[in-house]
Image (cartoon, rainbow, N blue to C red):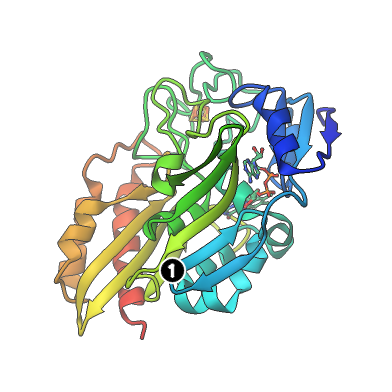
């Protein structure tokens, strides 16, 4: 395990000041929250910070449901959010995405702020035995493009990185137009979650728009007529303790038996959580019959680029959309 000093600042301002001095991604000073991702990466020498700044006790962990929507303090654990009665009743896609993530032990320890910032599960990123990984070692190449890429993305890729974003929660939240409240040395700002993660382009090691020292303080999900009739469908290689091969977060507003409004985000297929507005538009006014759902879902394939082993995801994501819309639409 990579050795480090653990800092326990007295308040959030002190934590931000410590981290802000150290620069952008993979800096010599990094935050640690629940530690479930960070510690694995330290164990494998993928991340080598000199100091870790603990966020324990410094961030809000409240879960508030009201007429304006849902507010989640970043320190709330995955288990707490998944089990909250207001989340289960009014935002089921969030609870489902969390319950389909990781294991009960991990969910008890992991925070939702850390969940959004966990690193990719690309096996070449997580194994320092492979030299070529632009995300871990900028300029070294990408072992996945010519290698085993079954788990990798078909949207948002570049010739420098094709790693899929791993978070299930982020996919559900992007479908619901969530906004992230960020605090930093220069004050507070709000970032739509769909804009938080950057495409890899030619700098895959810079994964988010966060400035050095900025923390995710809370996540806000606005009240919406689609939130209640929502569903998360996750396709994975085994039934538990596994990341998504493909997932679909669907939220619907129905007018009788017809879809009035659809929000759809996909996981496992994008370098970041991936909205499919062309599918959403095609579902407006559609019935829940199989033919119109399949026709709309087929539009998701536009712009998808398989790399060989992951070509099957292009068909699989369409099937996932159809199944998830059927399930969400059948909800009362
Ligand atoms: C065995 C296993 C299986 C898993 N399966 C899944 C799965 O199926 N689906 C899924 O979505 N996830 C899965 N995960 C990932 C898990 O959800 C994340 O590890 C966890 O949510 C990270 O939260 P944490 O609080 O432990 O973050 P940490 O590990 O402490 O931190 C993660 C990163 O976020 C940064 N950070 C943390 N909090 C903040 C903040 N508030 N502001 C700014 N930066 C911050 C840290 O600096 C670090 O870079 C799995 C993990 C394990 C170990
Ligand atoms: S896909 Fe990205 S994370 Fe994986 S080896 Fe290539 S550069 Fe590294």
On the rendered image, what quadrant is the C terminus found in? bottom left
* Residue 62 picture quarter: bottom right
Quarter location, residue 130: top right
Q: Is disc 1's CB within 8 Å of ligand 1?
A: no
Residue 236 point in image, percent of width and height: 50, 57
Measured as percent of width and height from the top left, residue 167 is found at: 53, 50
In the displayed orientation, state which residue is furthest to the top: 139
Left/right of residue 197 with respect to residue 32 in the rendered view: left
Q: Residue at x 51, y 68 (%)?
A: 96
Residue at disc 1, secondary structure: loop
In the figure, is residue 194 to the left or right of 37? left
Q: Is residue 263 above or below residue 329?
A: above
What residue sits 49% from the left and 58% below the top? 220
**Looking at the image, which is closer to me, 64 or 121?**
64
Quick one: label 1, few (<14), some, or many (20+) residues within 10 Å?
few
Instruction: Tell me, yes or no, if residue 317 can be seen here.
Output: yes
Number of numbered markers: 1
Q: Quadrant of the N terminus?
A: top right
Image coords of residue 286 (percent x, y) = 15, 71
Of residue 37 and residue 87, the one placed in the foreground of this image is: 87
Considering depth in this image, is 329 or 151 the residue closer to the camera? 329
Can residue 239 be seen in the rendering of this structure? Answer: no
Residue shown at the point (72%, 62%) measured from the top left: 108
Identify the residue position indicated by label 1 in the image: 68
* Residue 87 higher or lower than 315, as above or below: below
């Amino acid at each position: 395990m990579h050795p480090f000093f653990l800092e326990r600042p007295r308040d959030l301002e002190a934590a931000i000041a410590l981290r802000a001095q150290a620069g952008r991604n993979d800096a010599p000073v990094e935050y640690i929250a629940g530690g479930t991702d960070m510690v694995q990466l330290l164990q494998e020498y993928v991340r080598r910070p000199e100091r870790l700044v603990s966020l324990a006790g410094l961030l809000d962990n409240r879960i508030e449901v009201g007429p304006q929507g849902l507010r989640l303090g970043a320190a709330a654990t995955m288990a707490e959010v998944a089990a909250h009665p207001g989340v289960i009743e009014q935002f089921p896609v969030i609870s489902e995405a969390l319950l389909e993530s990781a294991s009960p032990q991990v969910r008890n320890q992991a925070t939702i702020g850390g969940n959004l910032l966990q690193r990719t599960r690309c096996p070449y990123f997580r194994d320092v035995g492979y030299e070529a990984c632009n995300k871990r070692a900028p300029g070294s190449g990408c072992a996945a493009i010519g290698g085993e890429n079954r788990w990798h993305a078909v949207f948002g890729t570049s010739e420098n990185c094709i790693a899929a974003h791993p978070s299930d929660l982020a996919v559900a939240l992007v479908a619901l137009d969530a906004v992230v409240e960020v605090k930093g040395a220069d004050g507070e700002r709000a970032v739509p979650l769909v804009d938080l993660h950057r495409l890899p382009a030619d700098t895959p090691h810079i994964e988010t728009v966060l400035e050095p020292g900025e923390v995710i303080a809370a996540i806000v999900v606005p009240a919406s007529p689609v939130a209640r009739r929502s569903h998360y469908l996750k396709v994975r290689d085994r039934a538990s303790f596994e990341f998504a091969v493909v997932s679909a977060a669907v939220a619907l507003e129905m007018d009788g038996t017809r879809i009035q409004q659809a929000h759809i985000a996909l996981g496992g297929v994008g370098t970041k959580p991936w909205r499919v507005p062309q599918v959403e538009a095609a579902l407006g006014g559609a019935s829940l019959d199989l033919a119109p759902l399949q026709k709309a879902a087929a539009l998701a394939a536009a712009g998808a680029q398989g790399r060989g082993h992951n070509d099957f995801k292009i068909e699989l994501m369409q099937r996932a959309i159809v199944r998830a819309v059927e399930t969400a639409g059948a909800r009362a």
